[in-house]
Amino acid sequence: MKTLIFPAAVLLLLQACQQATMPVKERPVQIDTMQLIAPPANSVKVASNEASVVGHDSTTYVRFGDCYFSLDWVIPDQKRNDFEHHPDTLYFRLEHGHSIEGQMLAVTTGETDRVKVYQRYETSAVIGKEPLLRWKHYLSPWEALPPEANNFFVCKKYSAEERGLFPAISVQVLQQYTKQHAPPSVYSKIAHLESFPAPPVRIEISRYYIRLDGLHRQTPEKINKLLVIDVTFKG
């Protein structure tokens, strides 16, 4: 495993790495230490709280003070993010056709003790291509991601059974909510539905959560950061 690189050497190493041609196709597990650890050269500090997000190719780099980590295929939600007033929670959208499941992420730390990483997910009812994001959900418990190596983690994959978990709800409750809050075209698809879930209604993961917990070495200040990643549904 490569030695973790600190910011003083990042720019020189990035220049050297630019000479190598990176594969274009998506890999289920990414093990390129430089791609995961080193932020791109145009990374800039966004706000006084030192939280920043920057994209480079398909990778999004997130910085919390002296802590960096990265994920592929996630796009910052500019409308919901507020680095200045709410720096501990950041929102992203997952590109259609991609998943965080199975991705490897690396966390670099400077004056921070080893960061622990946790993951959970949320399911929603989806009618055709319309997720009911403001209705009922199943929210899984937090699960710690064991490090594959020092500060390297692999995002958890979920089984078909886990992906289909949802609160026990009658079809009448679904129909009443949809009639009041969804477009008529959506309600018409389930107006005569006799059971739930049943086609055209299905249960899918609509959101992922990643939490990072750590502690500064020199101060009692704790690091508690939350990433909220919404799945994109398209026709």
Image: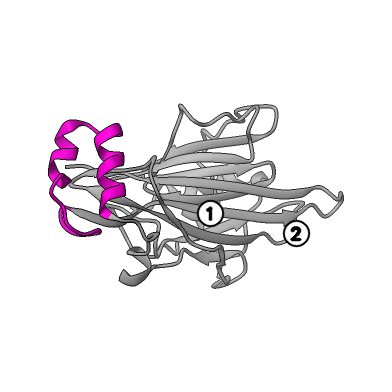
Residue 227 is inside the magenta segment:
no
Q: Is residue 3 visible from the viewing direction of this image?
A: yes
Please tell me which residue lies in front, 118 or 17: 118
Residue at 57%, 61% in the rendered image: 118
Disc marking residue 210: 1
Give the x, y percent position of residue 122.
43, 54
Q: Secondary structure at mark 2?
A: loop
Residue 193 is inside the magenta segment:
yes
**146 in relation to 139, above or below:** below
**220 in relation to 159, above or below:** above
Disc marking residue 113: 2
Q: Quadrant of residue 183?
A: top left
Left or right, 4 with reference to 56: right
> How far, Cα to Cα, is label 1 from label 2?
18 Å
Left or right, 209 with reference to 200: right
Mark 1 against mark 2, which lies toward the viewer? 1
Residue at 72%, 52% in the rendered image: 110
Mostly what secondary structure, the magenta segment?
Answer: helix
Please tell me which residue lies in front, 201 or 69: 201
Q: Quadrant of the C terminus?
A: top left
Give the x, y percent position of residue 135.
38, 44
Please tell me which residue lies in front, 81 or 159: 159
Q: Quadrant of the N terminus?
A: bottom right
Q: Is residue 25 visible from the viewing direction of this image?
A: no
Disc marking residue 83: none
Dot 2 crowding, Cα within 10 Å, few <14, some 14–19, many 20+? some
Specify the segment rendered in magenta. Answer: 171-200
Q: Quadrant of residue 196?
A: bottom left
Amino acid type, callout 2: Asp
